[in-house]
Image (cartoon, grey):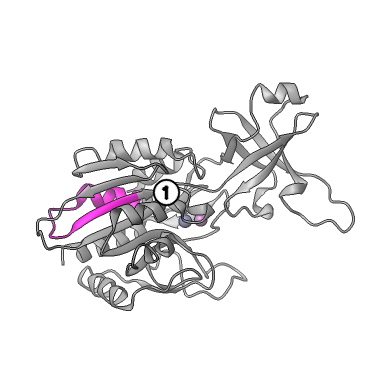
Amino acid sequence: MKELVQQLTAAYGPSGRETEVADLIEKLLKGKVDSFHRDALGNLICEKKGTDKKGKRIMFSAHMDQIGMVVTHIEKEGYLRISGVGGLNVSNLRMRRVKFQNGVQGVMVEQPLKPGETSSLRTCYIDIGAKTAAEAEKLVQVGDMAVYAEPGFDMGEHRLASPAMDDRSACALLVSLMQDLPACADTVIAVFSTQEEVGYRGSTTAAFSVAPDEGIALDVTLCGDQPEDRKLAIDLGEGPAIKIMDARSISNPALVDRLFAAAKRAKVACQREVLPYGGTDAAAMQLSRGGTPVCTVSIPCRNVHSACEIVDLRDIEGAKKVLLAYLMG
Ligand code: CO
Ligand code: ZN
């Protein structure tokens, strides 16, 4: 699992630029599923047919995109002004190394604030070492997207940090699940979705074309176990979380119960998640067609949407066991 997380978090893939991640996942799942399909939004839809003709169609969705920044214009001194692709937080951006798809790297700087001015993306710029706009334009164009360039690293025995744990850690979970899933009664459709960070756009179209009987999103969730933290009942390393509700979806209670029952069979302790904000691909799946029962299985993650998102490998392994127990009855 560790290698999968490392491989997937190293790939470049802000929203709308997920091809490198999709190519990698398709390679990892070759021979493990019955079909691959890429739709117009770039979703990678992997189907493994069930043995029971009357079985359900169960859709899993893990998003491939990560938050990023897009160049809006280039100053005459060669500095790049940016706007967010997904939920960027300025306090996480300062003096961070960033990289573009073509390998160009830079530093995200916040300029000195004028009296009364507050920090925002407008007070930040990327320095790529260019002296003039013309020099900068040889390296980067308006519309190019950057992501955090922080390399991933180990933290102790079980934990890993990287900028793209949201949501590549769940992509690793879904890849590993599909690699090891024995023949099962239900048809399983693993969707690696695009553009989640800008509003679940990929999973919206994927859910329509897949037309599942139930949908399970796989995503990270916030922890409440850091100093002066918000009061959330989620601790890193205490097991995967089964979402009861967030700001964008209320999980189907029967599906939640079945997932907890599977966790019990798998002897994996799961946490109960209520997140007063945020949303996942479950928000899109539930509203597809005539409606779909949904739930999210979450990987606890510290510092979500920063250059150093931290997950615990035991939570990911635990989630895989729960999902295997769920699918194998
Ligand atoms: Co996110
Ligand atoms: Zn996410």
- Residue placed most toward the observer, 10 or 249: 249
Asked if residue 108 can be seen in this view, the reply is: yes
The residue furthest right is: 115
Q: Position of residue 306 (x, y in %)?
A: 58, 52
Residue drawn at x 45%, y 40% is: 18
- Residue placed most toward the observer, 311 or 30: 30
Q: Position of residue 244 (x, y in %)?
A: 40, 75
Asked if residue 158 can be seen in this view, the reply is: no
Numbered range of the magenta stretch? 172-191
Residue 329 sits inside the magenta stretch: no
58 up-or-down from 108: above or below: below
In the image, taking residue 135 as reference, residue 204 lies left or right, namely left
Amino acid type of the residue tagged 1 in the rendering: Arg
Label 1 packing within 10 angstroms: few (<14), some (14-19), many (20+): many
The residue furthest front is: 290
Residue drawn at x 70%, y 25% is: 136
Q: Position of residue 240 (x, y in %)?
A: 37, 65
Q: Position of residue 22 (x, y in %)?
A: 37, 39
Residue drawn at x 49%, y 42% is: 16
Question: Residue beneath label 1, please?
Answer: 168
Residue drawn at x 36%, y 35% is: 23
